[in-house]
Image: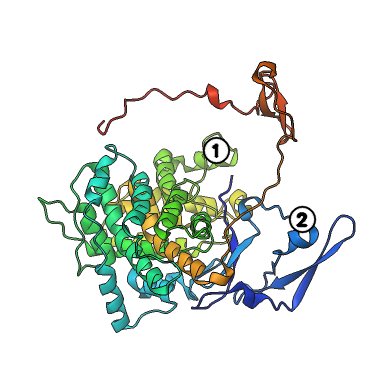
Amino acid sequence: FGSSCPRFVFCCSQRPIDMTEMSGAQEFATLTLPGGQEHKIPVYRGTLGEDINFLDIRDLYAKTNSFTYDPGFTCTASCTSGITYVDGPKGQCLYRGYPVAELCAKCDFMEVAHLLLNGELPGKKEKKEFVDRIESEYLVHERFRDFFKVFRMNAHPMAIMVAATGSLSAYYHDNLDWSKPDDREICAVRLIAKMPTLAAMAYKGHIGEPVVYPRAGMTYAENFLHMMHATPTKAYKVNPIHARAIDKFLILHADHEQNASTSTVRIAGSSQANPFACIAAGIASLWGPAHGGANEAVIKMLNEIGSVENIPKFIDDVKNKRSGIRLMGFGHRVYKNYDPRAQYMRILCNEIFEQLEYDDPQLQVAIALERAALHDEYFKKRNLYPNVDFYSGIVLRAVGIPLEMYTVMFALGRSLGWITQWLELVSAESAMRIGRPRQLYRGPTQREVQTIASRQSGFLHFDDDDETPQLGAGRQSSGAVRRISSAKAPAGPPDSYSR
């Protein structure tokens, strides 16, 4: 199944975007319903992607008693936004109008953070003030040290990140009024500042080492690497090549319009939930292998391929849909061309390997696999090009990031986009409505409740050729719905905080 990924109308603006400004549509589409009823639908276009029509169906139910059906939100714009623009067919990705590859080449992560939050790149003075403010919020409450002790040894860092980020709402809630601009601003600063601290603490807890405190005077990437690798007994000198790689990785992952995790943050935010809880929801969504876990899956795939000689067989297995064999790191829900982030990541990968004089057999496998896939008609017809995850895992491994931290690194970069999207959502108060999708119900029709003595043993099942559930007694179909009462927990060690 595909992850939910609503679209949006891109409007380049630094102020909150109010949907009421779009009420004066000049064009209309006409929908003809069964029975002949016609309904006029306003048509809008963004400041970019002028060839795409956005049909405003907000009054469709009120006037026609109809809903649209769009699983995964493949054709649904859930909001207007002026943050990031993605054009899949053209292979374009812009932050506030700037191509992401240009930002990687000419800016650091703090400059990009200023851009996303404020709408413009900072000057020297503005950058210093912004960095100073971020550094002033690096530390987390000292009780967080105890918080990390409750997790089992070797708990996955993403599990810890979900809990830790949500727990920030327990420490910063008394003076948070999301309707006040100053409160929203300090919330954004705190989140961006504390995410590398929490990520490093999650890693230290995972490997059983003591926490290392953040230090001012280092870049955002340098500070994170210092907290990850330093110990109380040994000083750690950050390799500038490693720091540059992490900085560019964070920029490339900072935002990507209305993807599954960003939409999760917006849906949670629409209920006026605490912003740290909203970001925790985004991290949980990102954790899935279909989303933020994809770069980890690429590394595992390359390990399974093993060597360049095995690529032809692997390609054949993918095309023949052999069970368990998938081409990871290729294709994208939006891009039908080369992912521009992947193009820069490939260049960065080669630069990092050359500068570090680092030899990784997986890089040769990746290059050969990319070449084979791009020249194969099977993949070309399906518009399967490398995405940003294909090379990012190799870069992370080259700079010493362990596999279990890959998705955490994604969350570290994307948290900037999440909080920017949250700010845009709550700042446009007149357009803010709680998210409430509808459904096409295909369950049983209304029925009478029988007493337990008169009930037949039965449960819902799906016919093999029909998605409509039926009530049957016994497993009449391979598509039968499993009874929850029959599930048994696998054998495992007793609950303990040690292995």
Determine whether, in the image, residue 116 is placed left or right of residue 138: right
Task: State the residue at coordinates (33%, 60%).
Answer: 172
Q: Give the residue pinned by disc 2.
A: 66
Closer to the camera, 447 or 299?
447
* Residue 375 percent coordinates (x, y): 56, 54
Q: Residues within 10 Å of mark 1 (few under 14, many from 20)?
A: some
Residue found at the far right of this picture: 36
Closer to the camera, 301 or 190?
190
User: Which amino acid, mark 1?
Assistant: Asp
Q: Is residue 305 above or below residue 398?
A: above
User: Which amino acid, mark 2?
Assistant: Ser
Q: Residues within 10 Å of mark 2 (few under 14, many from 20)?
A: few
Observer able to see residue 108? no
Determine whether, in the image, residue 59 is placed left or right of residue 242: right
Observer able to see residue 290? yes
Q: Earlier in the sequence, mark 2 or mark 1?
A: 2
Instruction: Give the Cα distance between marks 2 and 1.
Output: 44 Å
Q: Mark 2 and mark 1 in contact? Answer it, CB < 8 Å.
A: no
Determine whether, in the image, residue 292 is placed left or right of residue 402: right
Q: Give the residue pinned by disc 1.
A: 317
Element marked by disc 1: helix
Q: Which mark is residue 471?
A: none
| Quarter containing the C terminus | top left
* Residue 261 percent coordinates (x, y): 49, 55
Task: State the residue at coordinates (59%, 27%).
Answer: 482
What colouring method underlies this structural image? rainbow
* Residue 30 percent coordinates (x, y): 81, 67
Element marked by disc 2: loop
Determine whether, in the image, residue 236 is placed left or right of residue 5: left
Closer to the camera, 431 or 393?
431
Camera-near label (2 vs 1) is 2
| Quarter containing the N terminus | top right
